Amino acid sequence: MRHRLLLLGGTGAALALARAIDATMPDLAMTTSLAGRTRDPVLPPGELRTGGFGGVDGLVRFIDERGITLLVNATHPFAATMSAHALEAQRETKVPLLRLLRPAWAKQPKDSWIPVPDVKGAADICRWLGKRIFLSLGAGDLAAFAGIAHPHFLVRLVDAPETMPLARYDLVTARGPFTLADERALIEQGGIDLIVTKNSGGAATYAKIEVARELGIPVVMIRRPEIALDPGSDMVESVEAALDWIADQTERSPRTGDRNATTGEKA
């Protein structure tokens, strides 16, 4: 039986994995799902679907209807809702699930981090600390800072939002990865004295953390959501390890009793 993989994407790691699968596993049918929040995303090879599934039920229905035999969640570390839906779908369908999750950034001795549990906690810090604040967040996070009038914000997004809830701000639209020189210039020219970011991990946006370390700028660091794993689900931290997991799974036949074991091959 030909295996069918559903890759929940939207990250650089997901794109790299899709490209690696396309180059090394031609017999694996792959569909990548993107949330559709970015207007001009870099598209992966293979079949593509865009937009939400309609909750857990919609994801389960897609898995059943398409005869999906492998599920890889390579979404952003803070995509908590999608990750929870993937786990629930795995519990219901028994399709093996892999979480590809890059390691979180680790605090270094010269880092000045202020850990907070969520975006609201970060906004609370900005009410009393920082005059020129670099918000390295997503567009959906900005509403939490709407009532904070005294600082001037520097906001960097991939796409310009339709509306901006902030009173005083500069907007930069750019797509990573970002170099150390570029981040240093952005932070120094902006007179930044506080950085707010999520602990996304990875190298693409880490340069701002290095610049903050060099310049002694405090960083409000939003902690990652808790990661849940169940029997039938695994987690790896690299594209290479994900490829190994997929290769191991494709050597097996669907397990007896699995919902997709009886869906049959579709043309």
Image (cartoon, rainbow, N blue to C red):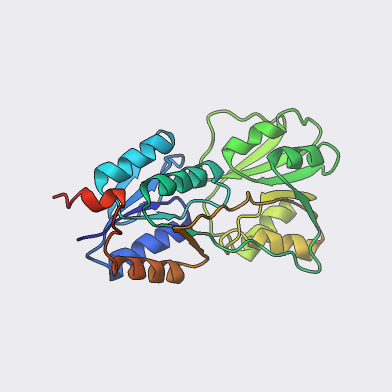
Quadrant containing the N terminus in the rendered view = bottom left
Instruction: Please give the count of numbered marks on the rendered protein.
Output: 0
Quick one: 255 or 163, which is closer to the camera? 255
Residue 43 in percent (x, y) is at 36, 52
* Identity of the residue furthest to the right in this view: 128
Q: From the viewer's perspective, is 220 left or right of 14?
A: right
Q: From the viewer's perspective, is 113 left or right of 76?
A: right
Q: Quadrant of residue 132?
A: top right
Q: Quadrant of residue 214?
A: bottom right
Q: Can residue 52 be seen from the camera position used here?
A: no
* Identity of the residue furthest to the left in this view: 267
Q: Residue at x 31, y 52 (%)?
A: 258
Q: Residue at x 36, y 47 (%)?
A: 93
Q: Is residue 233 above or below residue 194?
A: below
Residue 47 in percent (x, y) is at 27, 50
Q: From the viewer's perspective, is 102 left or right of 44?
A: right
